[in-house]
Image (tube, rainbow, N blue to C red):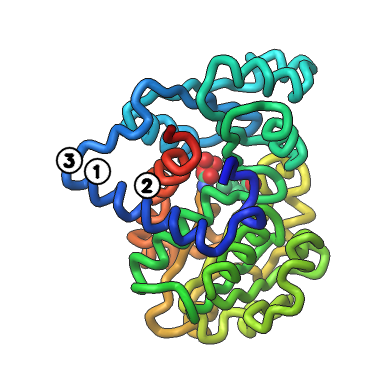
Amino acid sequence: MKHLLKLLDLSSEEIIEILNLADQLKYEQKHGIPHEHLKGMTLGMIFQKSSTRTRVSFEVGMSQLGGSALFLSSRDLQIGRGEPVQDTARVLSRYLDGIMIRTFAQKEVEDLAEYGSIPIINGLTDFCHPCQVLADLMTIREHKGSLPGLKLCFIGDGNNMANSLIVGCLKTGMKVSIACPKDYQPDPIVLEFAKDNPDFQLTDNVLEAAKDADVLYTDVWASMGQEGEFETRKKAFEGFQINDAVMAAAKSDAMVQHCLPAHREEEITAKVFEEHANEIFDEAENRLHAQKAVMVKLMKK
Ligand code: CP
Ligand code: NVA
């Protein structure tokens, strides 16, 4: 494994290895056991979109691993003025030991990996959010004991979160059902990956998707960069919400996950959010541990 560009590139074994290492690093951090695997190394973090969790967890993670992280906003980099990503990749490869990038087009991340000579980590594109789903799988496993056979139901937009959840769940032996409006379906590449898998279900019926689910998952109706479409999306996504009726369709011990930030009374009610806040903030915490595992796997010499 040279990069983390998308979960489609990883084998099931590689995903499980990352989750196991994440559990170990979490244990070490909680017990004050030193784990400075990346001493003296530097991670560059390129952000073309906002972030709270991704930025802070990567920066703190690098520091706990004995290295340091540089926040590089596209507003300040020459990339924001049109310097090609191919050149940026070759320049930054001469200074840094790894790059995390959050941007719009998946191609930009793939280009960085092709032209650079250091590990590239995808910190969210319009296509996928692999770091988030590694943290999600870690959290689900922590709460439920093991992953194979569990059913995750995602309700909402068929974009980056849904795309990565489909791949991450199917690769770890979980069942996954997606409830999304007809015009907001997952990416064709992901649907092609999932199409013959009996553990995959795609519907526009929220209650049918939620039936007997062990995990209910949702995300905002309008993602970063789509703010201008909010009014149209608000109509299209009406009813695509985790609420008491949806919880009642799932298993009685179902847990709730949300990548955050959350919009209460849109994709999730405030009541369900608060009742499951512990699981949701465990998930946010696990971004730190899962990403430390990714960085150790990719960057440790
Ligand atoms: N879930 C997530 O990626 O959060 P941020 O946008 O705050 O990084
Ligand atoms: N779908 C959301 C996820 C944020 C973590 C977005 O892209 O804005």
- Disc 2 crowd rating (10 Å Cα; few below 14, some 14-19, many 20+) is many
Which of the image's four quarters has the C terminus?
A: top left
Three-letter amino acid code of the residue under disc 2:
His
Closest to the observer, 32 or 279? 32
Mark 2: which secondary structure? helix
Residue sitting at x 66%, y 53%? 160
Residue at x-position 37% and y-position 51%: 22
Give how far across and how far down residue 263 sits, in percent.
55, 53
Tell me the residue that label 3 is attached to: 32
In which quadrant of the rendered view does residue 122 lie? Answer: top right
Task: Give the spatial CA distance, label 2 vs label 3.
Answer: 14 Å
Residue topped by disc 2: 289
Identify which amino acid the numbered label 3 is placed on: Gly
Q: Any atom of ligand 1 within 8 Å of the CB at mark 2?
A: no
Q: Which residue is mark 1?
A: 29
In the displayed structure, does residue 65 sit left or right of residue 216?
left
